[in-house]
Image (cartoon, rainbow, N blue to C red):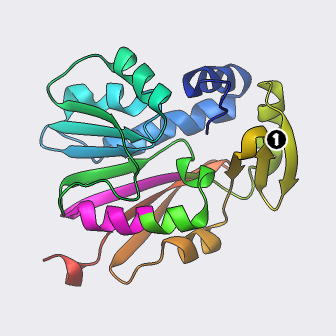
């Protein structure tokens, strides 16, 4: 989630200070991801922002790549994370990364990045992740649930964000950016691919992390 006038790291700290529910959600994202990371894991962080997950998992993985379309976010991420041989932080579009097929063991989209992009972009990014994931790899996507709308609106207002409209779980802000939540049925319709299994990890009533993997018949 990104307001052009407020760095995502600043928003994150504001949300932590405002809401214990948000703190639970963000810590649960880390715990769920950690289960799929070890010293042999190559990770791709799509929409990495200021590098929260890159910094967290750099010490315990083989390689981690953080991509974001925002130059300022990557600039801040490089300051926050530091210089390590197993880290690459770069301005890149997740719809066409340029990486070879089966390059990553774990691909993550955290912090409701999935809910901050339009559906056409979601489809292209999902197609890219399916191409990039290794045979036994995992794609992890966190999202707000459709029960989180009221909670999110209150949190956004307390954080000083200007809301233009709220409709069916989609909160629209100034500068044409938005944050959308999902019920699981709608989410499954978006991510549905013949080769993919999806398991949901619920995070209280706030959201969930969808764990996606290749079906056995596609593991070649």
Q: Residue at x 62, y 74 (%)?
A: 185
Name the quarter where the C terminus is drawn: bottom left
Q: Nearer the viewer, residue 11 or 2?
A: 2
Q: Which quadrant of the figure has residue 87?
A: top left
Nearer the observer, 87 or 91: 91
Q: Give the structural element (helix, strand or loop) at label 1.
A: helix
Q: Position of residue 125 (x, y in %)?
A: 42, 61
* Residue 102 coordinates in the image, percent (x, y): 18, 61
Quadrant showing the N terminus: top right
Residue at 68 percent of width and 56 percent of height: 181
**Extent of the magenta region:** 125-142
Q: Which residue matches tag 1?
A: 153
Residue 17's quadrant in the figure? top right
Where's residue 76, x and y in %? 44, 20
What residue lies at 67% left-to-right and 35% top-to-bottom? 21
User: Residue 23, relative to residue 43: is it above or below?
Assistant: above
Question: Is-magenta flag for residue 81?
Answer: no
Picture quadrant where residue 147 is located: bottom right
Q: Which of 59 and 54 lies nearest the eye of the viewer?
A: 54
Residue occupying the point 60% across, 26% down: 12
Judge from the rendering whether residue 114 lies leftward or rightward of residue 217; answer left or right. Answer: right
Seen in the picture, residue 53 relative to 116 is either above or below; the reply is above
Left or right: 139, with 15 as reference point: left
Residue 130 located within the stretch drawn in magenta: yes
């Amino acid at each position: 989630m990104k307001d052009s006038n407020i760095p995502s790291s600043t928003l994150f700290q504001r949300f932590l200070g405002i809401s214990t529910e948000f703190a639970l959600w963000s810590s649960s994202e880390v715990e769920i991801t950690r289960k799929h990371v070890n010293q042999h894991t190559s990770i791709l962080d799509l929409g990495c922002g200021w590098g929260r997950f890159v910094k967290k998992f750099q010490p315990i993985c083989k390689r981690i790549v953080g991509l974001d379309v925002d130059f300022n976010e990557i600039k801040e991420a490089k300051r926050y994370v530091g210089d390590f041989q197993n880290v690459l932080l770069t301005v890149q579009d997740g719809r066409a990364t340029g990486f070879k097929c089966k390059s990553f063991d774990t691909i993550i989209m955290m912090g409701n990045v999935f809910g901050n992009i339009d559906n056409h972009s979601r489809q292209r990014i999902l197609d890219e992740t399916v191409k990039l994931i290794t045979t036994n790899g995992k794609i992890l996507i966190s999202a707000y649930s459709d029960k989180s709308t009221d909670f999110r609106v209150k949190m956004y207002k307390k954080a000083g964000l200007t809301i233009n409209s709220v409709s069916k779980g989609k909160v629209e802000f100034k500068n044409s950016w938005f944050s959308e939540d999902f019920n699981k049925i709608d989410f499954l319709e978006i991510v549905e691919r013949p080769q993919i299994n999806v398991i949901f990890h619920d995070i209280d009533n706030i959201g969930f992390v969808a764990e996606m993997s290749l079906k056995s018949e596609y593991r070649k």
